[in-house]
Image: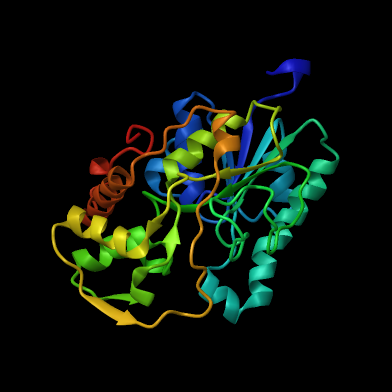
C-alpha cells in the first residue's frame, strides 16, 4: 500500500508487444500485475502473471473492466488498434478497437479518483513532420487526445515479442527478411531518420515513473539519438552476418523525414541508460531465432535480457 491506504497494485490493459515487456519488468520488481488483454500472451509472459490475474477480454466491456479494476491503484494502458495499413482500409473498425476501450477506462476512472493512469502513446506519428529536432514535448501534436493522466510518448519501439508477420517494425522485419533471403524495399535511399528505443527501456522508464507524482504529465521516451533506415539496415546485416537483398524505390510523399525525441525531461526524473541499438538488435535476433525453433525454454527472458 502507498500513502493514504491506496493499493499500489497495477492493472495492465493490453499485453501485446510493449505490454509484454511491462509485465516482465513489473514481475521482476515483485509487482506482479493484473492483466486485461484481448488475446492470451506468449507462455513465458503468461507464466509471470499470477493465478486468476489474467483476464481475457476487451476493456470496452464494462463487466470485464470492473472485475479487472477491483483493488487496483494504477492503470497502465498499452492497448492498441489496427496496424496503420489496416487502419486506412477499416477506419471505423480501428476507431472501435482503439477509442471504445479507452473511453470505457476513462469513464470507469472518473469514479476512482485515487487510481492513477499511465497511457502509452506514439511519439513518432503524433508529432508529424516536426519543426525542430530533437522534438520536445511542447511541440504541436498532429493529433493527440488530451488525457488527465501521465502520457508517455514513445519513439520507434523495437525488441522481443514484436513479430515480423504484422508488417510493422523495421528492426524485426529486417532481421526476418535477411535471415530468410527475402528482399527488403527501401524508399528514398533509406534516408528517413528515426529514434529507435528498446522495448525493455520503455518498460523500465514506465515502471520507474509509476510512483513518481512529480514532473510533467507528458514525457517523451526514446533513445534521443537518430538512426537512418540505411544505417539500421547495415547494423542488422552485421548482426545476421549476410547482406540484404534491397529493392530501391523513390521517396514516398507521406514519410516523415526525421523524428528524434528530446528526452531531457525524462532523464531529469529517472535514471535510464538507453540500450545501445546494436545490443537491442542482437537481443531481438536471439529471441526470433529461439521463437522460430519452437523451443520455448530456450527463449531469452525479457527481464534478464537487460
Q: Residue at x 70, y 27 (%)?
A: 214
How many numbered tags mark residues here? 0
Nearest the viewer among 200 and 250 is 250
Q: Quadrant of the C terminus?
A: top left
User: Looking at the image, which residue sits at the far left?
Assistant: 241
Q: Quadrant of the N terminus?
A: top right
Q: Residue at x 38, y 83 (%)?
A: 250
Quarter of the figure with residue 288 = bottom left
Colouring rule applied to residues: rainbow
Quarter of the figure with residue 24 = top left
Counting from the top left corner in percent of width and height, residue 84 is at 54, 71
Nearest the viewer among 280 and 119 is 280
User: Looking at the image, which residue sits at the far right?
Assistant: 111
Decide if residue 225 is on the left or right side of residue 70.
left
Counting from the top left corner in percent of width and height, residue 203 is at 50, 39
Q: Is residue 33 visible?
A: no
Q: Is residue 227 visible?
A: yes
Nearest the viewer among 267 and 289 is 267
Counting from the top left corner in percent of width and height, residue 277 is at 33, 47
Counting from the top left corner in percent of width and height, residue 96 is at 69, 67
Image vertical order of residue 246 relative to residue 221, above or below: below
Image vertical order of residue 72 relative to residue 179, above or below: above
Q: Residue at x 69, y 49 (%)?
A: 138
Decide if residue 233 is on the left or right side of residue 127.
left
Amino acid at each position: 500500500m502507498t500513502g493514504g491506504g491506496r493499493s499500489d497494485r497495477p492493472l495492465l490493459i493490453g499485453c501485446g508487444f510493449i505490454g509484454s515487456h511491462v509485465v516482465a519488468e513489473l514481475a521482476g520488481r515483485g509487482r506482479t500485475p493484473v492483466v486485461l488483454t484481448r488475446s492470451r500472451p506468449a507462455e513465458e509472459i503468461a507464466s509471470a502473471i499470477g493465478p486468476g490475474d489474467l483476464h481475457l477480454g476487451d476493456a470496452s466491456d464494462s463487466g470485464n473492466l470492473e472485475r479487472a479494476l477491483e483493488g487496483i491503484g494504477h492503470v497502465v494502458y498499452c492497448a492498441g488498434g489496427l496496424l496503420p495499413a489496416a487502419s486506412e482500409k477499416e477506419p471505423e473498425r480501428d476507431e472501435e478497437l482503439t477509442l471504445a476501450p479507452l473511453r470505457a477506462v476513462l469513464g470507469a476512472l472518473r469514479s476512482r479518483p485515487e487510481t492513477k493512469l499511465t497511457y502509452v502513446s506514439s511519439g513518432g506519428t503524433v508529432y508529424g513532420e516536426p519543426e525542430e529536432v530533437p522534438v520536445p514535448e511542447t511541440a504541436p501534436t498532429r493529433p493527440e487526445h488530451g488525457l488527465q493522466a501521465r502520457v508517455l510518448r514513445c519513439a520507434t519501439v523495437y525488441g522481443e515479442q514484436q513479430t515480423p508477420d504484422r508488417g510493422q517494425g523495421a528492426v524485426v522485419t529486417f532481421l526476418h527478411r535477411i535471415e530468410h533471403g527475402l528482399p527488403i524495399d527501401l524508399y528514398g535511399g533509406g534516408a528517413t531518420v528515426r529514434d529507435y528505443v528498446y522495448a525493455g527501456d520503455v518498460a523500465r522508464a514506465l515502471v520507474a515513473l509509476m510512483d513518481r507524482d512529480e514532473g510533467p504529465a507528458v514525457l517523451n521516451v526514446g533513445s534521443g539519438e537518430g538512426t537512418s533506415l540505411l544505417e539500421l539496415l547495415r547494423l542488422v546485416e552485421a548482426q545476421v552476418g549476410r547482406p540484404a537483398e534491397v529493392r530501391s524505390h523513390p521517396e514516398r510523399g507521406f514519410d516523415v523525414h526525421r523524428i528524434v525525441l528530446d528526452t531531457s525531461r525524462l532523464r531529469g526524473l529517472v535514471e535510464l541508460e538507453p540500450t545501445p541499438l546494436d545490443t537491442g538488435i542482437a537481443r531481438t535476433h536471439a529471441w526470433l531465432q529461439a521463437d522460430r525453433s519452437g523451443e520455448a525454454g530456450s527463449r531469452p527472458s525479457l527481464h534478464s535480457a537487460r
